[in-house]
Image (cartoon, helix red, strand yellow):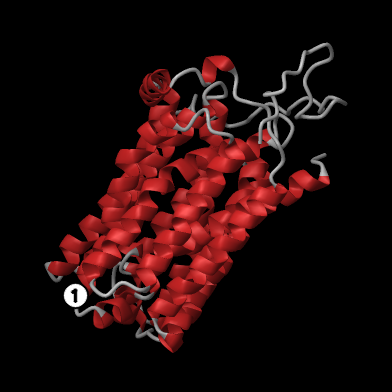
Amino acid sequence: MVKLHHRGAIVVLGASCFVYVTAETIPVGLLPQIASGLAVHEADVGLLLTSYAVVAAVTTVPLTALTMRIPRRLLLAATLAIFVLSQVAAAFAATFLILALSRLICAVAHGVFWSTIAPVAARLVPDGQAGRATAVVFFGNSLAIVAGVPLGTALGQWLGWRVALGALAVAGAGCVVALLTVLPRLPALPRDAATRAGAQLRAAVRIIRSGPVAVVCLLTAVVVVGHFAAYTYIAPLVRRAGGLEGLGLSALLLGYGVAGLLGNWVVSRLVDRRPRAVLLGLIAVIAGSLALLAPVPGLAVTVLAALAWGGAFTALPVVLQATILRVAPRARDAASAAYVVAFQIGIGGGAFVGERLVSAGLLGRLPALAALSAVAAGVVVALARRTFPARLPVPAAEPATGPLRPPPGTRRSPRAYRS
């Protein structure tokens, strides 16, 4: 059983995920307001996600390698501090260019944050519970969709999008203080995993080439491209399909997030036992719900399809991140960095494809494209049986010494528990 202060640390990690995901996706809910306030086209605002994702994808692996020797608590706090500064700059942006540049500042720290947080959560729990710990931390992702994006959208519609970004900066500052206070001291990374930055970069490249990690990254990029092509423009999509806008859009985003919370909870109970069935089930729901949105279905079908879509996709990263930790147990940081790159490629590629179609007047093609990408991802899962086995072995009972104590007779050095 996880110690009480370790549970608190996992909760704080989840809160940090909440502010990061809310900030990354807030343009989705405030797309019309930002476009109007800065006198740009809605499709241009959608490109904020593309530029963010490109910078995060390019910088994740080298920066993760360069920061291997930095204590995890300080590293996570630093990435959140950069997040706070970027949100403050975005809130006061006078032009669209300044807004885009402020988001790119955050994107530089984004990859390091996400490639670090899951391995840290896994080190706080006994062996065999990494999937559940990841699910708890990624609960912050679901909560961002459930509360962050809809409340940020409502706040932006009420007081302006700048106020919404300012509120995110305040929340991020609170997470910095909480991380430095609650996150426990963790054993230093083994010497063979944190020697020099150059060696770490080469290790990260080898991890990307590894069969199981490459399969997970391919699957991630395929399904995320389709998802974000449609999700980036969910505001005009549901306005077209069900006539929803304003508070109706906020309510739909709230329901989307609530469904995501439910999906996250269900997946957390199964991810460490039946990964293939869980993943295929989520992908089937994503494809089916998006297929319903491809025509103009009316209000009721739009709402039901959006709820199913939200419940399935929000839970998907829990399975994928748990798989990454499982298939690369000796190089979790490097494998997580590769996964983050794949996810950011998916976000950037999806937002770019969406912008191209919207600019060409083909908004209605986005759900069908997203459904087809989910079907392609399902084919990858079905073929990669070794990466996604039908069952996982039940882990042995946790030793009495606990997950963070060294084996009996192990000599402790003063640097072994740097914070």
Residue shown at the point (47%, 70%) measured from the top left: 149
**What residue sits right under mark 1 in the picture?**
41
Q: Quadrant of the C terminus?
A: top right
* Residue extending furthest toward the right: 400
Q: Residue 327: horizontal and vertical position, in percent?
A: 53, 26
Q: Is residue 409 or residue 156 the one in the foreground?
A: 409
Pick whichever, 348 or 416, lies toward us: 416
Report the label total.
1
Q: Given the image, on which type of amino acid does mark 1 rest?
A: His
Residue plotted at (79% across, 16% down): 407
Q: Residue at x 44, y 69 (%)?
A: 306
Which residue reaches farthest left?
A: 360
Residue 14: x %, y % from top left? 61, 54
Q: Nearer the viewer, residue 87 or 375?
A: 87
Residues packed near mark 1 inside 10 Å, few (<14), some (14 to 19) or many (20 plus): some
Task: Indicate left or right for 385 with 7 as reference.
Answer: left
What x and y, as percent, mark residue 287? 39, 55
3 in relation to 202, above or below:
below
- Vertical placement of residue 248 versus 265, above or below: below
Seen at 41% across and 82% down, the residue is 299
* Residue 336 in the image: above or below residue 109: above
Residue pushed farthest front?
Answer: 414
SS of the residue at dot 1?
A: loop
Residue 204 shows up from this direction: yes
In the picture, the quarter occupied by the N terminus is: top right
Q: Position of residue 355 (x, y in %)?
A: 20, 63
Give the quarter of the image for residue 265. bottom right
Is residue 136 visible in this depiction of the protein?
Answer: no
